[in-house]
Image: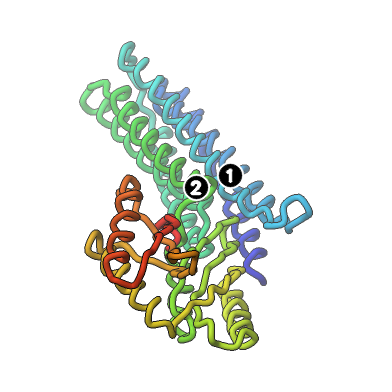
């Protein structure tokens, strides 16, 4: 079974189990809430009905994410999984908000809760079932690296906490007479709201274009060590099109004196090897001069000058172009965000340094890159 079929099968299984479990739990809790006149139990039941919708969205999200690439979507449809995760997060926020409203109303106008054995049993069974679902979804979300199932697992965990607190308040009122149902529900609602907001932020990041995948980046950089002809790299960009689907590009600096056909074959080999890691990578070949004493001296001075300013600074694509009566120095400089306002100062500093060496007159032209890709 290939990875996509496995993801779809596991996603469907999680969705079907969630739908069945939440329908049964919601129906039982609604009955118990009406029987005991407890607004927190009724709210808990409504939360489970919302979980049914989440389970349906999980199943639909997995199904749509497995659609193959087409003319309008050449990179596939795997981002549907991120979208369904985001919708689940929004539902969690909605439930937390509605529960907070109900809790405040209960605090303002408290009513007694009628204790029944059947209600106690239903709440205990609900906690056990939801905890089992939390463990199940957590396990399979790690197995297939699914943000949707991670969101579902978080929702199940929240349900365990919420139902446990509801059960505690139910027992406290039974044995002490203190009407804390509304206060406890409000605390749970705030917890759910915060959890939903954090999940929404996490699930929105890959859709908006979050920073490079650290694990895939490490694989690429470690693989470069197997190719000694690569003198340096820059502009590594990783584009995430859904779980397990990525497209990358990178620039390799290689000695210009090497045979171009040989270099081309080495680059092709590198790109083919990266397919084994589930990513399509494109390498751009940057020929660099390594046998010019002047260029090597100038590059050394530039690097030393920049390191004196900030040891995070480095350069690539260093080039020297002769002009009429002077020379132009070109290079790219990845710039940290906190040094964005130093561009003019850095250019002037480098230009003064190289012009003081006695090698002639130079004009320095720097292309400032994003540090995130270098």
Circle 2 is placed at which residue position? 152
Q: Quadrant of the N terminus?
A: bottom right
Q: How far is disc 2 from disc 1 in space, using C-alphas?
A: 13 Å
90 up-or-down from 186: above or below: below
Asked whether 73 or 170 is in front, the reply is 73
280 up-or-down from 345: above or below: below
Mark 2 element type = helix
Answer with left or right where residue 75 lies relative to residue 359. right
Answer with left or right where residue 37 lies relative to residue 276. left
The x and y percentages for residue 116 are 38, 29
Quadrant of residue 221 in the image? bottom left
Asked whether 203 or 30 is in front, the reply is 203
The x and y percentages for residue 34 are 47, 23
329 up-or-down from 260: above or below: above
Circle nearer the N terminus (2, 1): 1
Q: Residue at x 42, y 40 (%)?
A: 159
Circle 1 is placed at which residue position? 83
Q: Residue at x 58, y 68 (%)?
A: 279
Q: Quadrant of the C terminus?
A: bottom left
Q: How is the image coloured?
A: rainbow
Extreme right residue here? 71
């Amino acid at each position: 079974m290939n990875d996509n079929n496995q993801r779809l099968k596991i996603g469907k299984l999680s969705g079907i189990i969630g739908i069945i479990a939440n329908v049964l739990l919601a129906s039982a809790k609604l009955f118990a809430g009406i029987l005991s006149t407890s607004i927190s139990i009724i709210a808990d039941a409504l939360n489970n009905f919302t979980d049914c919708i989440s389970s349906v969205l999980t199943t639909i999200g997995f199904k749509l994410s497995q659609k193959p690439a087409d003319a309008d979507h050449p990179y596939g449809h795997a981002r549907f999984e991120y979208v369904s995760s985001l919708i689940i997060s929004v539902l969690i926020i909605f439930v937390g908000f509605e529960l907070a409203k109900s809790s405040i109303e209960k605090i303002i106008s408290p009513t007694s809760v009628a204790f029944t054995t059947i209600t106690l049993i239903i709440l205990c069974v609900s906690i056990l079932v939801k905890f089992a679902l939390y463990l199940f979804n957590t396990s399979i979300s790690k197995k297939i690296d699914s943000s949707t199932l991670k969101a579902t697992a978080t929702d199940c965990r929240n349900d365990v906490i919420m139902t446990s607190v509801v059960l505690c308040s139910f027992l406290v009122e039974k044995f002490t007479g203190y009407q804390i149902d509304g206060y406890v529900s409000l605390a749970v609602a705030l917890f759910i709201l915060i959890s939903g907001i954090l999940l929404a932020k996490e699930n929105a990041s890959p859709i908006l274009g979050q920073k490079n995948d650290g694990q895939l980046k490490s694989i690429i950089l470690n693989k470069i060590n197997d190719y000694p002809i690569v003198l340096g790299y820059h502009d590594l960009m990783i584009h995430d099109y859904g779980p397990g689907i990525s497209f990358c590009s990178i620039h390799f600096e290689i000695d210009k004196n090497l045979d171009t056909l040989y270099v081309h074959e080495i680059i092709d080999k590198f790109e083919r090897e990266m397919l084994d890691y589930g990513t399509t990578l494109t390498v751009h070949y940057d020929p660099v001069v390594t046998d010019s004493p002047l260029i090597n001296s100038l590059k050394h001075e530039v690097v030393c000058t920049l390191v004196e300013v900030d040891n995070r600074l480095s350069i690539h694509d260093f080039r020297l172009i002769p002009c009429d009566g002077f020379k132009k120095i070109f290079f790219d400089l990845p710039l940290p965000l906190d040094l964005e306002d130093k561009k003019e100062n850095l250019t002037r500093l480098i230009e003064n340094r190289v012009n003081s060496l006695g090698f002639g007159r130079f004009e320095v032209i720097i292309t400032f890159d994003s540090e995130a890709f270098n």
